Structure formats: structure tokens, C-alpha cells
Amino acid sequence: MSILKLKLRVASFLLVLLLGSSLAQTPAVVSSSDWKDIVQNRLSLYGHRNWIVVADSAFPVYAEPGIETIVVNADLPSVLRYVASAISSSRHVRATVFLDQELQFIDEHDYPGVSELRKQIMAPFAKEQVSSIPHTEVMTKIGEAGKTFRILFIKTTATIPYTSVYMRLDCGYMSDEVEGRIKTAMSAVGNRQPK
């Protein structure tokens, strides 16, 4: 085999690798029924510290390999209802919900329908389940979690900013109160041991 043919084969191989790795980073575009299968599949795999985010259409795609983004042709409230119901029906996880604090300040005049959308976003959750924090803080939490834990982003057709709903999964069969008592008991034992 000539050196030219060998160089062409190597170049072709490298091109295929390059294209393959760039395609792996692009979001999956799935049909309206397939995304529900993906949610159910990921939910069975996920545990505490994983995240599921139902996002507006301008949400960015992350470069971290553990952060998966899918695009669905469905409105945010219907996707959120499905995801929230799937989580609450699950035995092993529950959701702690974060909203962008900025959502509270979006005016109906600027984005008609935002008041109704805010109600629809809150509807699937208990009040104590939801925290509103600045967008930059939520993004920091997501970025940090994505370094170690898997995250699923579901981009919807929503076109009102700051409407993404961030659900951090926690252990479904242990409450925060029980965990607090365990940590307090551990601390008490640690303080009694001689040093």
C-alpha cells in the first residue's frame, strides 16, 4: 500500500472519529412519545443527586458528557406535569424543586401569559417543595452536579424566559428530618469518643 493511500485512510479514520464525537454532543431530538420513554428510563436509573430539568426553548446545551439534552415539541406545562407525576409515582426518589427567582418579576405586559404559566409551573408541587433562587445560583448548582452526576434536560417549546424548572432528585424513602436525626446522632457519638 502506498504512503498516500495510508495517509488518506488515516485521515478518513480521524474524520469519522471527529464527526462521531461532535455528534455525540448534540442534543437528541425525539418525537412526542419517545421523550416519555426516555424520562421513564432515566428515572429508573437516577437516584439522589441526579437532576431532571424541564426547560424553555432557549436553554443552552452543556458540553459535559453526563448532561443529556433532548428537545421535544411540547409545551412546558404538559411536559412538567408528566415528569412531576413520574417522579411522585416513583418509590425511590422525590423532587426538590428550584425555580429562577427572576420568574416572579416578569411582567404580563412584556410576556402575555406569564401569570398563568407561573400557576401551571407551581401546580404539580407542594409549596414547601419549591425554592426560588437567582438564575446564576441554579446554574452553578447544575454545573457542579453535572461534573459528577447525570442530568437530563428536556427543552420544550416555551418562549418565556426564566420558566425552566429544575428538579434535584433526593431519596424518596428518607425525609430530610430523618436524615437530620441520623447526622445529629452521629455527631453526638463522635463528640463522646475520646481523642
Image (cartoon, grey):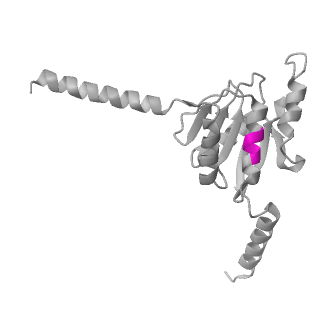
Q: Quadrant for residue 48, please give it.
A: bottom right
Q: Split into 4 quadrants, where in the image is the C terminus?
A: bottom right
Please say whether residue 125 is one of the residues in the magenta stretch: no
Q: Up-down: is 119 above or below 150?
A: above
Q: Nearer the viewer, residue 83 or 166?
A: 83
Q: Position of residue 44 (x, y in %)?
A: 62, 53
Q: Is residue 105 visible?
A: no
Q: Up-down: is 186 above or below 64?
A: below
Q: Split into 4 quadrants, where in the image is the N terminus?
A: top left
Q: Is residue 140 visible?
A: yes
Q: Quadrant for residue 156, please give it.
A: top right
Which residue reaches farthest front?
33
Which residue reaches farthest top?
109
Specify the segment rendered in magenta.
81-85
Q: Up-down: is 108 above or below 33?
A: above
Which residue reaches farthest bottom?
194
Q: Nearer the viewer, residue 189 or 17?
A: 17
Q: Nearer the viewer, residue 189 or 132?
A: 132
Q: Nearer the viewer, residue 137 or 79?
A: 79
Position of 83 with respect to 113 (left or right) is left
Q: Position of residue 110 (x, y in %)?
A: 86, 16
Q: Quadrant for residue 72, please give it.
A: top right
Residue at 85% of width from left, 29% of height from top? 117
Q: Position of residue 179 (x, y in %)?
A: 76, 66
